[in-house]
Image (spheres, coloured by chain):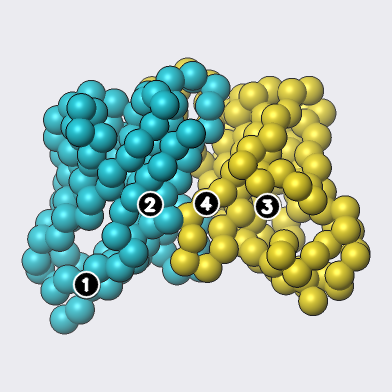
Chain colours: A yellow, B cyan
Amino acid sequence: NAGVTQTPKFRILKIGQSMTLQCTQDMNHNYMYWYRQDPGMGLKLIYYSVGAGITDKGEVPNGYNVSRSTTEDFPLRLELAAPSQTSVYFCASRLAGGNTGELFFGEGSRLTVL
Amino acid sequence: GQNIDQPTEMTATEGAIVQINCTYQTSGFNGLFWYQQHAGEAPTFLSYNVLDGLEEKGRFSSFLSRSKGYSYLLLKELQMKDSASYLCAVRSPSGNTPLVFGKGTRLSVIA
């Protein structure tokens, strides 16, 4: 049981480049989330999804896009990378109606935009 | 909206007890979570409180007062491996709504 898997773990981008951060979970969780974490800061929500075909903006969605075509996958797309997007990105999932609703996190993707 | 406050840093001695406080102002409430995050790693779930009172889980306990918008995480018999950031997070009444996280408290355990 792999849990939540994110790829890549590290990436360096040039300003203006595009890339997709991949996230997949094998726990059949309905809800999936993308957070970013800057040094000394908490987790800020970028986008989330409550099920396949449904996505919604979080607190900091500008510069990002998501899709949710399957229950398992929730990729995050950066279209025109900017230095402000240098951060650690965490994908998380949880089961709808679970006992505590705890989030299960991937290991993170560390992105640097130069 | 939701505002969550917790101290930025704390230091405590190995073997001691430490209390990490979290206050929140929210438009609604449906549970408070504590997560532990070691440097360079993902957060991991520690505790969940939805009703007032104390939840105990081994060396860790979490307390909630909904009327005061207040929670604390109590760590007993501190070990060096407890050096980490501790994140307080709140969920609003809608079951679909994602967690909102505080900035975290970085705890250093010293010998």
SS at circle 1: strand
Q: Nearer the viewer, residue B9 or A90?
A: B9
Distance (Cα) linking label 3 and label 2:
21 Å
Q: CA distance from mark 4 to mark 2?
A: 9 Å
Q: Please report contact status of discs 4 and 2: CB closer than 8 Å, yes or no.
A: yes
- Left-right relation of B54 to A74: left
Q: Are marks 2 and 1 in contact (CB under 8 Å)?
A: no
Residue B11 badge: 1
The answer to whether marks 1 and 4 sit on the same chain is no
Q: CA distance from mark 1 to mark 3?
A: 33 Å
Q: CA distance from mark 4 to mark 3?
A: 17 Å
Near-viewer residue (A16 or B44): A16
Residue beneath the point at 14% across and 35% down: B54
Amino acid type assigned to the residue bearing label 1 in the image: Thr
Extreme-bottom residue of the structure: B111
Q: Tell which tag, 4 or 3, sits nearer the viewer.
A: 4
Does residue A30 appear left or right of residue B102 in this picture? right
Same chain, labels 1 and 3: no
Q: Could you tell me which residue is drawn at 23 percent across and 41 percent down? A: B71
**Residue A50 visible in the shown view:** yes
Q: Indicate which disc residue A18 carries.
A: none
> In which chain is the residue bearing label 3?
A
- Check disc 3 and give the amino acid type: Gln
| Residue marked by disc 4 | A43
**Could you tell whether A85 is left or right of B80 in the image?**
right
Which amino acid type is shown beneath numbered disc 4? Leu
Near mark 1 (Cα within 10 A), the count class, few <14, some 14-19 or many ≥20, is few
Image quarter (top left, top right, bottom left or bottom right) of the N terminus of chain A: top right
Q: Which residue is mark 2?
A: B87
Q: Amino acid at mark 2?
A: Leu
Q: Which mark is residue A6?
A: 3
